[in-house]
């Protein structure tokens, strides 16, 4: 079973990545073998610096967080599912704010109380198995 959260990348995102040059430098750190043309494609086409909300982000930090979420978590969850011929189970944890690790108390039932209040439907599902 693989899963990822809606805002998985935020905890791994530097608030100091504010300019296009910062994002290119960040890409080089994340992917040391990335070629300059590929980095420019990621920064300009896949995650353009458009902050009107149409791309799923409204500021540079949210842009970088989405890039981290998709590159590190979403793509790997998809890759693992495909590696097993999609004979797998997967989930997207969408309980706001959907940060990394927030799904653990809901997926791995624990006797400890969660760090956040789960919606009643989710809480009932966990209580009944």
Image: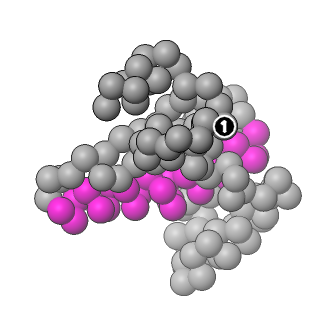
Q: Within the image, what quadrant is residue 126 found in?
A: top left
Q: Within the image, what quadrant is residue 57 found in?
A: top right
- The residue at 50%/52% (across/down) is 70
* Magenta stretch encompasses residue 2: no
- The residue at 65%/76% (across/down) is 28
Q: Secondary structure at mark 1?
A: loop
- Chief secondary structure of the magenta span? helix
Q: Residue furthest right?
A: 16
* Magenta stretch encompasses residue 75: yes
126 on left or right of 57: left
- The residue at 35%/53% (across/down) is 2
- The residue at 18%/62% (across/down) is 84
Q: Residue furthest bottom?
A: 33
Residue neighbourhood size for the residue with mark 1, other residues' Cα within 10 Å, grouped as few (<14), some (14–19), many (≥20): few
Q: Position of residue 86 (x, y in %)?
A: 17, 53
On the question of residue 57 being in view, the answer is no
Which is nearer the eye, 52 or 127?
Answer: 127
Which is nearer the eye, 74 or 1?
Answer: 1
The colour scheme of the drawn protein is one colour
Q: Which residues are magenta?
A: 59-84
Q: Is residue 82 above or below residue 29?
A: above
Q: Position of residue 61 (x, y in %)?
A: 75, 47
On the question of residue 56 being in view, the answer is yes
Task: From the image, tell me which residue sits under label 1.
Answer: 115
65 on left or right of 1: right
Q: Within the image, what quadrant is residue 107 found in?
A: top left
Q: Is residue 62 above or below residue 31?
A: above
Q: Residue furthest top?
A: 120
Tally the numbered discs: 1
Q: Residue furthest front?
A: 111
């Amino acid at each position: 079973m693989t899963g990822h959260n809606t805002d998985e990348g935020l905890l791994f995102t530097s608030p100091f990545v504010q300019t296009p040059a910062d994002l290119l430098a960040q890409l080089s750190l994340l992917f040391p073998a990335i070629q300059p043309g590929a980095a420019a494609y990621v920064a300009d086409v896949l995650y353009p610096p458009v902050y009107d909300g149409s791309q799923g982000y409204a500021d540079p930090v949210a842009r970088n967080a989405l890039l981290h979420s998709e590159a590190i978590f979403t793509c790997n969850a998809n890759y693992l599912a495909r590696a097993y011929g999609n004979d797998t189970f997967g989930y997207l944890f969408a309980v706001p704010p959907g940060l990394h690790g927030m799904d653990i108390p809901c997926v791995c039932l624990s006797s400890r109380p969660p760090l956040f209040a789960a919606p009643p439907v989710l809480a009932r599902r966990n209580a009944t198995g």
